[in-house]
Image (cartoon, rainbow, N blue to C red):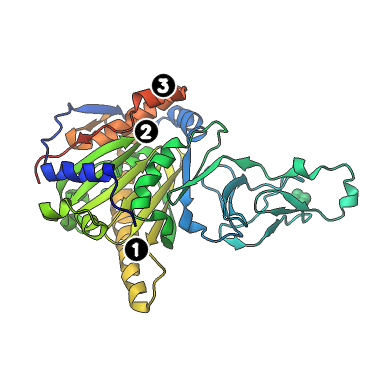
Amino acid sequence: MNAPTEGQRALAAALTRGVDADRAPITHVKASAYTSLERFTAEQAAIFQRAPLVLAPSALLPNPGSAIPHDGFGKPLLLTRDAQGVARVFLNVCQHRGTRLVEGCETVKANRLVCPYHAWSYTLDGRLAGLPRADAFPELNRADYALRPLPTHEAGGLIWFAFDAAADFAHADALAQDFAAFDLAGQYCFRRRMHRVAANWKLVMDAFLESYHIQRLHAETIAGFFHDGVSAADRIGPHQRSAVGRTASLAELAAQDWPTLRGAITYTYQMFPGAVLAVSPDYINLMVLMPQAVDQVLVENFMLIPAPPASEKARDHWERSWHLLDEGVFAGEDFRACELGQQGLAAGAVEHVTLGSLEQGVRHFHDVVEAWLTRADASEKSAVFPFRQAAVQNSAL
Ligand code: FES
Ligand SMILES: [Fe+2]
């Protein structure tokens, strides 16, 4: 595990200083941003079909010679880790007559993937390895029948992909430096679960972009671990990084070692457009959002721990943490609030939602969404969203 990065230390220092609240003016987001089908369709085309997307933690597929289907992003995908350990994403479609290649949604361990229809087989790097009765295809050039690859990038313990061949993964590499600091790539995937949330995908991101609600919505679960609204945030490209102050002493906030620092600060990364990484004291949650409809999103929650549980006692410990977060905090509180939000917004009773100074992360996220909707040029994007721009949101501890 590496030392905290410069950026992580800067956010800790901002919390330590207790910088005055950012007196940002009240702003608004139109309710239709969450309820308009036209808007949803535009976001799919301008953002989800173009931006690099987090698919899964590396820990989902740790072993060479394995593959797992993935169906959350509208097309059947196949994530593989080939014999050399390289992660790849393909369309999960046989090139003979277009049949889905690998069924189900669980990991398969195999050196070759065999189509159920006529048994064409593929290696995990996508090559057509063989076909029965090859004499029936005398002129077939196997190189023309490789699985259709999508741009894939593994960095810092996350596997990213994109539908757009021109997608730029530079910001994934920038985040990877932070993730290396707490050894994200070395974690073990303890549990994962798919949630179907009856809310617009942005409502889920909003819930992980402000700490204003922690003392209220989470009053019965985790509120006691945190100060009220003590957070600092900055940006890495279109992504956000935030630090939320736990009930620790000022001295602990200045710690350089991870056990103390993770006890004092919950670092959270909001990866545009739809992934959240939350670093708790002894485990990490990754949530991947997959919009399905204007009012429905799948959220896959992964719980990552440092190593497989070595005893029943250890397993019980992690199970309790899993249950608290996945069932209690996320499903029972955050996602429930998102669904209530969708119900209220769909009723048309408010024209816009209102954001205060503790909700600047939400403000920025919606600005980035708008920018992707209205502009296509990547160089313009990097000019508008500088690498690092501190925006401290809280008053004193
Ligand atoms: S469709 Fe896959 S082998 Fe025929
Ligand atoms: Fe929450």
Q: Is mark 3 within 8 Å of ligand 2?
A: no
Dot 1 or dot 3, earlier in sequence: 1
Q: CA distance from mark 1 to mark 2?
A: 31 Å
Q: Amino acid at mark 1?
A: Trp
Q: Position of residue 227 (x, y in %)?
A: 14, 50
Q: Which mark is residue 170?
A: none
Secondary structure found at label 1: helix
Q: Position of residue 28 (x, y in %)?
A: 25, 27
Q: CA distance from mark 3 to mark 2?
A: 12 Å
Q: Which residue is mark 3?
A: 380
Q: Amino acid at mark 3?
A: Glu
Q: Which mark is residue 322?
A: 1
Q: Is mark 1 within 8 Å of ligand 2?
A: no
Seen in the picture, residue 195 relative to 189 is either above or below; the reply is above
Q: Amino acid at mark 2?
A: Gly
* Residue 289 in view of the camera: yes
Please tell me which residue is depicted at 76% across the width and 40% down the height of the picture.
144
Please tell me which residue is depicted at 12% across the width and 35% down the height of the picture.
21
